[in-house]
Structure formats: C-alpha cells, structure tokens
Amino acid sequence: IILTTMVSFWLISLVASIYLSRWSQKPVLAAYEKEKNFVENASHELRTPLAILQNRLELLFQKPTATIIDQSENISQSLAEVRNMRMLTSNLLNLAKRDGGLKVELTTVDQTYFEKIFENYKLLAENSEREFTSSVHLKDRVKLDESLIKQVLTILFDNAVKYTDVGSQIDIKVEKTGQNLVITTSDTGYGISNEDKKKIFDRFYRVDKARTRQKGGFGLGLSLAKQIIDACGGRIDVQDNQPQGTKFIIKLRA
Ligand code: ADP
C-alpha cells in the first residue's frame, strides 16, 4: 500500500509539474508563434516585389545597347516595386515600434479638429472622383490622442477610396452619444463578406491579394487601426453598409 501510494503521488506530481510547466510556457510560446508568423509574413511580402525587380533588371541586361526610352517599361516597373518595398518596410517599422507599447497622449479638442481633417479628405476624394460628405456634431470638447486618431481616420478613409469605384460615396459621421465619441465611416464600395469581416483586423490579411497588391495594400492598415483604438480603450467594428459597401464604427470614451 505504501509503495502504491508513493508511486501514485510521484505520478500525480509528475503530471502536475509537466502541466504547470506547459501552462507557464504558454504565453512565451504564443508570443514566439506570433513573432514567427510576423517575420514569415513580412518576408513573404518582400519576396514578390524582389522577384519582380530581379526579372525586370535581368530584362534590362538582355538588351545592353537599348536606350532608356526603349527600356522605360522595365525601369518604371522596377521603380514601382522599389516604392512598394519602401512603403512596406516603413509600415513594418511603424508596427514594430508600436509593439513596444503605444503611448497615448490625450488632449481636449473641439469639432474643428475633425473639420480640418475632413477638409483634406474632401480634396483627396475629389481628386480620385469619389463623393465625400462629413458631419460633425460635438457640443462639448472631447479628449483624444490627436495624432493617433488622425492616423486611424486616414487608414479608414484611404481604404474607402481604395475599395470603391469611381463615383462612389464616402461618408464620415462624428457624434457624442452618452459618454462615447462615435465615429462612423461608410462607403458604397465592394463590401466585405461575413467570413472576411472576422479576419480583416489580422496582420497581413487581405480579402483579394491580387487586387489589394495592385492598390498598394499590405493588409496592415486595419490591424494598426485596431491596435491604436485598443490602446485608447475603445473598440472598432465593421458592418455592412446599406444598400451597399462597408461601414466601420469606432467607439471611444471621451
Ligand atoms: P490594406 O493595406 O491591404 O488595405 P487593411 O488592413 O487596411 O489592408 O485592410 C485589410 C483588407 O480589408 C483589405 O485588403 C481589403 O480587402 C479589406 N477592406 C478594408 N477596408 C475596406 C473597405 N472599406 N471596403 C472593402 N474592403 C475593405
């Protein structure tokens, strides 16, 4: 009996120690997995522009006597890929910096803060032949991080331009309901399926890789927007816009 009890005790403590050591390693493993995924995704994203650049440069060398004008297609495509890579690397650096902890600096603003930002969007929308309207209803001043919220608004506005056709409508509404500052952006563009809605805030997730790449997207904008809104203690949600397109709703305690 003594021997059986001792063996059972030993077995129980062995199982418990294995379980506990696994459990305590879980966050470390999860962080490692996340980092590994990030590096894999980033390398994957750089591989395509690098491969295109290599092809284009090899084509240049195949006709060493050709003039710059003859080779303009190869040169301009190479430049486009270099620009792509610069944008990607600066996005990646931004994200990496933010991973170290996002510092939120609150100031009080009134509705002119939003109106100034939207004036610029109006011009940008006109240039890309989209209709843009905005409405800001703030009786009181609100507390927010001016630079971070502007960054989120710009991500949502850029996407609304990218994922709509010429002639589409983009609206942004800002209002205070109770204790919350609610910002709603809506567009009449391509919309997002319910399946994709669950994933669009993940890093590097793009609904249509080919189309997004053509539009210069890496699937990082919305993950950055969510990271910022989370750090501000708010939430960001996506819905269908009626009758067509996409709507993003941000709620912040302000
Ligand atoms: P990207 O830089 O590729 O645009 P995001 O993280 O900002 O990356 O968006 C992720 C994906 O969500 C996009 O690739 C696009 O497919 C989809 N998406 C984002 N905003 C919209 C929108 N307003 N309408 C339709 N699809 C959108």
Image (cartoon, rainbow, N blue to C red):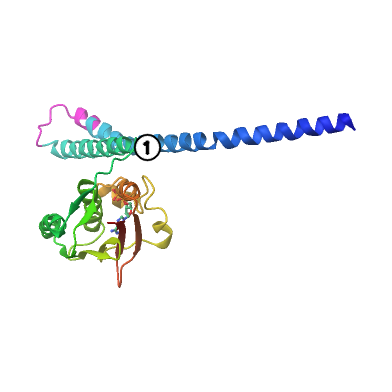
| Residue 199 shown left or right of residue 107 in the figure | right
- Whether residue 65 appears in magenta in the rendering, the answer is yes
Residue drawn where x is 27% and y is 31% of the image? 54
246 and 6: which is toward the camera: 6
157 and 42: which is toward the camera: 157
Q: Secondary structure at mark 1?
A: helix
Read off the magenta span. Answer: 58-69
The amino acid marked with disc number 1 is His
Residue at the farthest bottom position: 243
Residue beneath label 1, please?
44
- Circle 1 packing at 10 Å, graded few (<14), some (14-19), many (20+), is few
| Quarter placement of the C terminus | bottom left
| Quarter placement of the N terminus | top right
Residue drawn where x is 50% and y is 34% of the image? 28
| Residue 8 shown left or right of residue 239 in the figure | right
Residue at the farthest right position: 1
- Whether residue 11 appears in magenta in the rendering, the answer is no
